[in-house]
Image: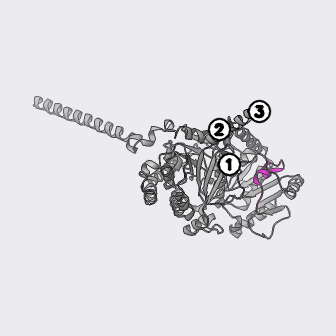
Amino acid sequence: MKFTMKYILFITLVQVTWCVVCSYRILMTFTTPAKSHYNIGMAIAKSLVDAGNDVTVISSYRENNLIDGKYRNIFLEGLVEKWFEILKIDEDSTSVFDLVNQSPFENNRFLIELGFIMANLTIEHSAFKEFLKSNGTFDVVILEELYSDALKSLGCHFNAPVIGFSAGAPNAWVNSAIGNPWPPSYVPDVNAGFQYPMNIWERFWNTAAIVYRDLSFHIVHIPQQNALMKKHFPHCPDLSIVAYNVSLFFLNGHESYSQPMPYFPNMINIGGIHMKSEQKLPQGLQDFMDNATKGVVYFSMGTFLNVSKMTSDVKQIFINVFKNIDVQVLWKWDNERLFGLSRNVKLGKWFPQQAVLAHPNLKVFITHAGIGSIMEAVRYGVPILTLPVFADQNSNAVYAEHLGYAINIPFKNIDEKKLLRALNDLLNNSKYREKARERSALFMDRPMKPNDSVVYWTEFVIRNRGASHLRVASVDMPYYEYFLIDIIVYLIFTISVIFLCLHFIIKRLVIRMKLKQA
């Protein structure tokens, strides 16, 4: 009996010691003022906590659903409101919908401004400063990559490797940081809304947008962020070093809904990590969906766009269209009332989106084409009507239509006839549902679950103190070498010299022949 008790105590001590040893300290920052981005970040945090790690999250949103285990939240209170105030964009105003008119060039300037404000507000926040004074230690830093490179100084400050996270598939800011190629001949700029194959004019404007974005990144963005970093972290190296010192990237993408493009080995797709395996409908909504024998259309423009702030003309278009379809409609509406609705429309400030999409009576999803909504529609095999407003929504929508499970109508081009025709086509033509189910099968067919992938690769970076063996040489190459400009100049110079020499020789020969004939 004594031997057995000693054996149990020994095993328990070994297990406790192992848990202490294998538990890593992880710092994460998700300060982008977009709840959808934050939700994905928290899914990463939960995966790491569930694996037994000690996770600290610096965020612009307070975590209401507490994570069991070793978790700490540094809440930057008021940051989101301050961000909107500085940019003079009211989250509850039509200004957000006005972004629909931005060109890729304007959007790039907007993102650079957004990134600087975001990084500055984060670093200047009292809770952030208090956290830095605590002199904690971390094994790795995970931060969102969205034009806020000054925050990469946290890796330098805590002497820890950095992992980047992007709420979308490979894009300009990720590719720039990691050296991933993005040929403008077939990789569309994330905000251009083009789709391969591009015609000559699309390739021209795509090239112009990518060149402009790359130049402004290095000429405007990096110097701005470097000055900010040097002000608060003077002990860190220049940002020209820090910005590219990223071990690997987690990308919120997957081949089932993202366009195939170049991927380096340190770019890891984790699309779908935020999705819950089971999400139940409230009883009233369950009855509504169950009784809708002719089907349901679900309309949501995500967490960032408040549809109640659309112009009255656009609201009326939707009201008229929904009157003319013979199915039930769930409309995510952020205000108290909407007059003139037909009896088949049910309003709600919030719906459990994944549970709605999973219901067999759900026929069509009307969406702004945010990446989260796109992947959820793909996961449950639901055809979509896309109404993109700004940023990557245009590219997401165009590619969804290209794959055959969506019809795309840019928000700025909405009219009643077009919307009604598209909705009826999606409801009555089975080809969209078939294509959506094909994409759903691809989404589910993967070698490792996203949360397992996050845990493995995070701990891989920690165990190896970074992933320098995955770093591609292009990150350290100057532009003239990467684009072979020095080789081109050398060849032009050499060929020019040869031609000049030949010209000189031939000229001398001609002169001599003329002299002999004279």
**C-alpha span from label 2 to label 1:** 21 Å
| Residue 128 vertical placement versus 152 (above, below) | below
Picture residue at 67% right of the left edge, 40% below the top: 16
Question: Which element type, helix, strand or loop, lies under badge 3?
Answer: helix
Horizontal relation, residue 122 to residue 478: left or right: right
Q: Residue at x 64, y 68 (%)?
A: 94
Q: Residue 510, percent across and down?
A: 17, 32
Which residues lie in the magenta part?
Answer: 350-363
The residue indicated by pointer 1 is: 46
x then y, percent, for residue 104: 53, 56
The question of residue 225 being in magenta is answered with no
Residue at 71% x, 51% y: name it.
68
Question: Does residue 366 appear left or right of residue 296 in this picture?
Answer: left
In the image shown, does 492 or 328 lie closer to the viewer? Answer: 328
Question: How many angstroms separate mark 3 from mark 1 (CA)?
Answer: 40 Å
Which amino acid is tagged 3? Lys
Q: Give the amino acid type for the residue marked by disc 2 in the picture.
A: Trp
Q: Which one is earlier in the sequence, the residue at label 3 or at label 1?
A: 3
Lower position in the chain sequence, tag 3 or tag 2:
3
**Three-letter code for the amino acid on which mark 1 is drawn:** Lys
Closer to the camera: disc 3 or disc 2?
A: 3
Mark 2 secondary-structure assignment: helix
Circle 1 Cα neighbour tier, 10 Å, few/some/many (<14 / 14–19 / ≥20): many
